[in-house]
Image (cartoon, rainbow, N blue to C red):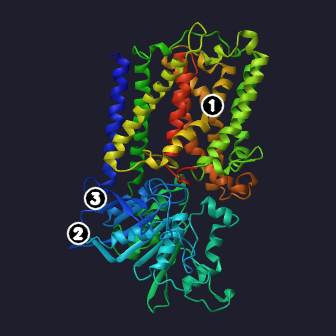
Amino acid sequence: MKPKRIFGVAVTFVLFALALILIIGIDTNWGNTTVKKLTLSTADGDVISAILYKPKTATPDNPAPAVMYAHGGNDMLEQGSAYAVELARRGYVVISWDYTGCHNSDIATGPSETAPSEAAGAPTMGAETVYNTLKTFNFIDQSKIVAMGHSMGGQYTMAFSINNQEAVNLQVNLGMNYYGSPKNEDYNFNFVCIIGDADESCLVRSNNDVASIFKVEQIRRIFFGDFKSEADKVPEIEIGKKYYTTSTNGNTYSRTVYMPDSCHAYYLVTNDAVQTVVYAVTSNIGLGLDAGVESYEDHGKISTVWQVKDIGFILMLAAAVAGMVVLANFLLDTQVFKGLKLSKTPTLGIEKSNWMHWVFFAVLVILPVALFRPGITASRSFLGINISKLWLLGGTNNSYISWQWTVSIGMIVVFLAYHFLWGRKHGGNLLNYGFRTADDGSFRIGYIGKAFLFGLLTVGCGYIIFSLISAYTKQGMHIATFMLSTINTNRTLCILMYFLFQIPYFLTSSLALKSIGVTETEDSTKGTLKSILIGTVCTVAGLLLLWLFFVLIVTQGKTVTNSTYFAQDRVYISTIAIFPLFIGMTIANALNITVSKKTNSIWAGLFTALLWGTWMLISCGGMAKYIY
C-alpha cells in the first residue's frame, strides 16, 4: 500500500477514535451518566425517537428531577446536547426527543399529539408520550418535572405544561415568547422565559427591541397573576428578577425572564446562554447549582463542557470525509475502476492573462450570492410554477433545492457565454467538457454505470464510518446548524427524488467552472487543493460572507429589520441555513472536483457529489410526507 494511503487510513482511524472518545466521554460525563436511545409510541401508534441521559446518582432510593427537552423547528434531538450534558452532570435525568414528523419520529397519523387544546392553543408533538414514559421510571422524582423547549419546541412544551399543570414543576421557554391561548388564566407551575438579545426571530417579531417582548400584556398578567385589571395597570417585568405569584390553585409559583447574549439559532447559542439555562433550572429545582453561585449575577461562574462535544461532532464529520477521500483514491487504482481515468483533454479554461478569465471568475463568485434571495423564496413558486407539491421534506431543505435550481439557470448562462466566447474556439465540445465515456469518443453506458457505482461506494464508505460512530454514540451529528444522521427507512423515496432534484446544480456548476479551468491545475495534492479552493470560492464562499455579515449585524448591531433583505419573507431563517449549506456544498464540490480531476470526466465526480448531497439533505429535519 502506498505511504500516502497508509497515512490516510491512519488519519481516518484517529479521527474515528477521537470522535468516539469525545462524544461518549462528554455525554456520559466520563462514565457517570448512562445514555440510551429510546423508541416510544404515541397513543396513535406513531414512533417517537428519543434519547435519555440518566446520571448514576438517579436511583429508586434517590430519585432525580427530570427535564423534558424539545428541539426547535426542522431540527433533531441532538440540538439539545448543550443543555442535556450540563444538566445530567448536575444530577438531572434528561430526555430529548425528535418531535412529531421530525428526524426519526413518525409523521402523526392521529390527533393524540397534534390536536391543540383550547387552553394550550398548540399541539404537544410528542411531549405527552415522553411524559407517559417518564411516569414509569422509578428513578424519577415525579414532583420535579421540567418541561423545556427551544423555539417551536417551546410552544409544544408550553402546551404540554398547560395541559398537565399538576405534573409540571417548571416550564422553560428558550428563544420563544409563546404562552398558550390568551384566554387561558391557569399557569400552575413555575415559569422561566429566556430570550437572547441577539435572537434573530425575536428581533424580527419585536422590531429589534427584544426587551419589549417581556412587556406584552399576556406575560405580564402571568407574572403577576392579574387577569382582571386593565392592561396598563399591570406592572412591567424586570429582567433577571424572580417574581412570585399566587396562581388559580392557591399555590405560589416563581416567574423569571432572562436575556443572555443569544439562545435561539444554535450557532448563536453562547456559553452565556447555556449558563443561563443551567442557572434557571438548578436555582428553581434546588439541585446542582455550582458552588459560589448565589444569584443570577454569578451565573458566569457556572462551569460548562458542552463545546468539547461539538469538537467530537466535527471529528465525526471529518472521519467520514477522510474515509471517502481515502477510498476514492484507492478505488481509482483498482482493476475494476482504473478504467474511469481517461486521457487528458485540451486545456480549455480561459488563460489567467486574459481579462475574460477574471470576469468569469467574478461572475461565478457573485452569482450564488446574487441569486440567494430569489432562489430561497422560489421554493413554492419557481418561474411562476407552483412546485409546493414536489417536496417530501419540510423546512429549509426545499429552499436549498430552489436556490440550486435558480443558480443552475445562471450557471448555464455562464457556461454558454464561455463556450461561444472562448470554449469552441479552443476545441471545446461536449466530449472535451467532461462527458466522455471512452478515450476514442464513443459512448459507453457501462462507464456511466461504473461511475455511479464508484460514487455509491465512496459515499457509502463515509456513511458506514458515520453509522458506526452513530451506533456507539446513539445519535447523529449536530454542528451549529449543520445536521447529519443515518437515513430513516421512511425517507427512502426522498433518496431518489432529492438525488434527481440536485442534478441541475452539480451539472451546470461543473460546466460553468470549466470557464476558469478549475480542474486544470497540476496533478499533485497541492494542485488538487488549489482546485478545491478555487471551486469553493466560486460556488459557496460568497454565501459564507453573506452569513458572516448577517451574524455580525445580529450579534453586534442587535438588528434584523433594519435590513429589508433579511427581514422580509423570513429570509433570516434561510440565512441561518447558509452555514450548513456552506459545509455540505463545500464537501460535495471538493469530492466532485477531486474525482473529476483524476478521471478527466464529469461522471464519477458528479455522482459522488450527488449522493453526498442527497445524504446531507434528507437525513434530518422535518418530513412533509413519505410518498406522493
Residue 298, percent across and down? 43, 68
Residue designated by label 3: 33
Q: Which amino acid does label 1 sit on?
A: Val
Q: In which quarter of the image is residue 558?
A: bottom right
CB atoms of marks 3 and 1 within 8 Å? no
* SS for dot 1: helix
Residue 380, percent across and down? 70, 51
**50 horizontally vs 208: left or right:** left
Q: What residue type is labelled 3?
A: Thr
Give me the residue at 67% from left, 51% from top.
388
Residue designated by label 2: 59
Residue 395, percent across and down? 59, 53
Mark 3 and mark 1 lie on one chain; the one further toward the N terminus is: 3
Given residues 437 and 194, the one toward you in this image is: 437
* SS for dot 2: loop
Determine whether 561 is above or below 251 in the image. above
Determine which of the numbered discs, if any, sits on residue 537 in the image. Answer: 1
* SS for dot 3: strand
Kindly tell me whether residue 366 is visible in this rendering.
no
Farthest left residue in view: 61
Given residues 185 and 561, the one toward you in this image is: 185
Q: Distance between the residues labelled 3 and 2?
A: 12 Å
Q: Which amino acid does label 2 sit on?
A: Thr
Give me the residue at 33% from left, 73% from top.
135
